[in-house]
Image (cartoon, rainbow, N blue to C red):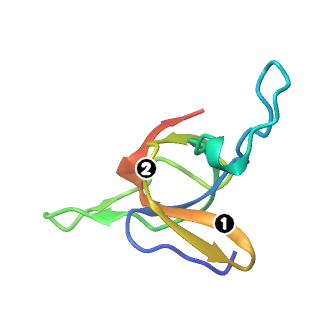
Amino acid sequence: MKLKPLSDRVVVKPEEAEEKTASGIILPDTAKEKPQLGKVVAVGKGKVSESGNMIKMDVKVNDKVLYGKYSGTEITFEGDELLIMRESDILAIL
């Protein structure tokens, strides 16, 4: 990917929102829940601490992650809907 995040930022491709409920009801766009799962597509180098040491990233490309519902900034890059967020916005690696 040509998009390279800076510092402790991560680029995540969200999973698609569910189009049907478990009982088979088709949901309109306005009723779909915002996904909270995604795949990491790019990772920054890490953050520099106050003492000057590099703090490496815990996540890596292709990790499946769980993030906060309203985390990150939504962008469109090369036709893909992506989120750019800080590593601290990621709640867990699945």
Name the image quarter holding the N terminus: bottom right
Q: Quadrant of residue 94?
A: top right
Q: Marks 1 and 2, Cα distance to the nearest angstrom?
A: 15 Å
Residue farthest toward the right in the current orientation of the protein: 24
Q: Position of residue 85 (x, y in %)?
A: 44, 60
What residue is drawn where x is 85% and y is 24%? 24
Q: Relative to residue 10, is residue 20 drawn left or right?
A: right
Q: Amino acid at mark 1?
A: Glu
Residue farthest toward the top in the current orientation of the protein: 23
Q: Which residue is mark 2?
A: 70
**94 to 75, vertically: above or below:** above
Q: Quadrant of residue 49?
A: bottom left
Q: Relative to residue 69, is residue 83 drawn left or right?
A: right
Q: Nearer the viewer, residue 81 or 91?
A: 81
Q: Which residue is mark 1?
A: 81
Q: Amino acid at mark 2?
A: Tyr
The residue carrying pointer 1 sits among few (fewer than 14), some (14 to 19) or many (20 or more) residues within 10 Å by Cα, namely: few
Label 2 residue SS:
loop
Residue 17, label in figure? none
Question: In the rendered picture of this protein, how many numbered marks are placed on residues?
Answer: 2
Q: Position of residue 86 (x, y in %)?
A: 39, 58
Q: Quadrant of residue 53?
A: bottom left
Q: Relative to residue 5, is residue 19 drawn left or right?
A: right
Nearer the N terminus, badge 1 or badge 2?
2
Q: Position of residue 45 (x, y in %)?
A: 45, 67
The residue carrying pointer 2 sits among few (fewer than 14), some (14 to 19) or many (20 or more) residues within 10 Å by Cα, namely: few
What residue is drawn where x is 70% and y is 47%? 15
Label 1 residue SS:
strand
